[in-house]
Amino acid sequence: MSLEQIWIAGSWQAEPAPLGELQSHDPRTGAALEPRFPISGEATMRTALRAGRAAAEELRAVAPERIAAFLERCASNIEADRDALVDCAHQETGLPKEPRLRNVELPRTTDQLRQAAAAARSRSFVDAQIDTKLSLRSMRGPLGGPVAVFGPNNFPFAFNAVMGGDFAAALAAGNPVIAKAHPGHLATTRRLAQAAAEAVSALELPAATVQLLYGLPSELGLALVGQPELGATAFTGSRRGGLALKAAADRAGRPIYLEMSAINPVFLLPGALSERPSAIAKELAGSCTMGTGQFCTKPGLSVLLAGSAAEAFSAELVTLLAAAPLGTLLSGSGAEQIEASLALWTRHGARVLRGGKPAGAPGFGFESTLCSVSGKQFLEHPEALQTEAFGPVHLLVLADSPAEMEAIASQVEGSLTGCIYSHTQGEDDALYERIAGRLRARVGRLLNDKMPTGVAVSAAMNHGGPYPATGHPGFTSVGMPSSIARFTALHSYDQVREHRLPPELRDSNPSKLWRRIDGEWTQRQL
C-alpha cells in the first residue's frame, strides 16, 4: 500500500524520498491503523521552508479581511465534515465521540478559528502606538517567515497542528504555517489539512500558506526550529520534547513558544476541608480522571494539613477513584511513562494508596492512582516529587502545619495553574493571603474553589505560566487576541511618510481601530 501524500507548496504530492513510515494506533485495542504516512527527509523540509518564506512575503500584500475570511471558511469546512472528523479522531485517540469530540472539542475549535478571524479583521492585536511630536509610530506585524506548529496528542482538534489554536493565531497575524502532525492522530490531521487546503484555494491565498508534514526524524525536527527562514515555532507537548526543541531554537536565536507539562498544585486550606470535604473530594477525583488524566491542566498534587480530616479525605478520594471507570490512554508509551514517574515518587518517600499499575490490555490504560507523601519529604525532594505523571494519577502532600504549607507553596515549580480552596465564610483568609502571595508568581492562572481542567477560549484567559510549564511567562497559547502576539514582530516607523505607512498607523485611517496617540487610547482620527 502506498504512503499518504504530504501537502507542500499548494499541492498534495508523494514524499519523494521517505525515510520510513508512521501509523496511528487504536488505543482501545493497540492495533495499528491504516493508512500509512511518510517520514520526510531534509530535502522536503527545505522545500517547505523555501515555499513558506515566499508565502510570508506574499501574505504581506493580502488584506486582513481575506485572512479573516480564510479562517472562517476553515471553521465552516470543519463543521461540514463534522461526522467524518469525529469518527476519525475517535478511532485514533479513543476519546469519546460525545460529548467530548462532537459537542465540546470540535465547537471549541471552530469558535477559536472564528475568534482569530475577528481579531484579524479588527486588528485588535496590533497595539498601534503613535507619537506625533517625534513622528514615531509602531505596531505589531507578521514575522516575515512561516511558523512551524507541533501539536500534542491529547487534543486532536483544538490543539492540532492544523486548525488548532496555534495555527489560528499564527495565520491571524499574517504568517504561513508549516504543520508537523502528531503521530497519534495522523488521519485526523490529514482530514483537517484537506479542509484547510480547500479554504486556501477558495480565498486565493499564497500556495504555501499552509503546509503539512507527517513526520521528521528527531534530528531534523531539531534542525527545523533553528532555520533562518522560520519566523517562529509553537510546540505543545511533553517537557522532554519541548526542552530539546527549545535548546535547538535558542542555539540558533530563533523564537519558540512552548506549552509543556505542569503539576498544577491544589491547596486545600483547613477551613475548606472541614466545611465541605466530600464536595471537594468529588471535584478533585473528577478532575484527575477527566480525559483519563491526560490534560495539561490536570491537578497533579494537592497540599493539605495532616490529621484526621486529611485521613478521612484521603479515604474518600480512594473510594471515588476506585469507582471511576477505567479510561484509555492515548499511546502505548503512556503507561510506561506513568510507571517511571511513580517509581521516582516512591524512591523519594511517596506511598501508593490506590492503583499504581497498568490496566486495560490489549489497549492502553492505567489504574486511577492516589499516592501520598509528607510535607517534610516533599520539601527535601521537590524536584523529583513534581515529576509529571500524565494520566489518572494524583499525589497528596500532607503538611504538618500552615507554615509548612507556605514553605511548600514556595517550592512549587512554574505551572500553568494553581488552585486554592478556602472556607466560604472567611475562616481561611489569613492563610489564603500567605499561600496566594507565594503561588501567584509561580502559576499562570490562579483559581479559587475551582479545579483547573477547563480552559475557556477567552481574551482574559492565560494558558501559560512560568518556566518549566512554558518557555516564557509573558504569553498564552489560548485566547484571542492575546495568543496572537507570540507570532508578531514589533514594527516601528520613524519619520516615514504618510502614504508609506501601514493603514493602521496613518493619520487618515478611517477605521475604528483603537490606537494609542500621544499616550491616550482613542478610536478617533488625528
Image (tube, helix red, strand yellow):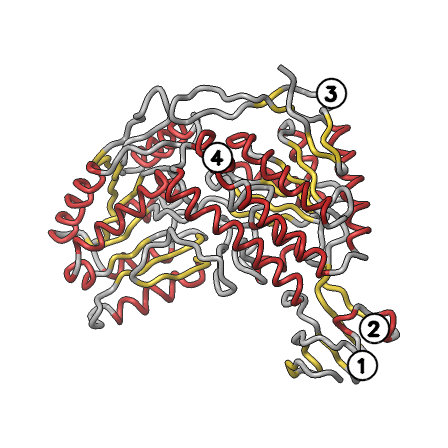
Q: Mark 1 points at which residue?
A: 134
Instruction: Please tell me how crowded label 1 is: few (under 14), some (14-19), or many (20+) other residues with Cα within 10 Å.
Output: few
Mark 3 lies on residue: 17
Q: Type of residue at label 1?
A: Leu
Q: Mark 1, mark 4: which one is toward the viewer?
A: 4
The disc, 3 or 4, on the residue closer to the chain's N-terminal end is 3
* Foreground label between 3 and 1: 3
Q: Name the residue under label 2.
A: 494
Question: What residue would you read off at disc 4?
Answer: 89
Residue under the image location 44 percent in, 52 percent down: 415
**Residue at image coords 50%, 45%:** 260
N-term-proximal mark, 1 vs 4: 4
Disc 3 to disc 1, how far (Cα)?
56 Å
State the image coordinates of residue 53 (x, y, percent, origin top left). 79, 45
Whether label 1 touches label 2, CB < 8 Å: yes
Compared to residue 259, the image places residue 222 above or below, namely above
Q: Which is in the foreground here, disc 3 or disc 2?
A: 3
Tell me which numbered mark, 1 or 2, is placed earlier along the sequence. 1
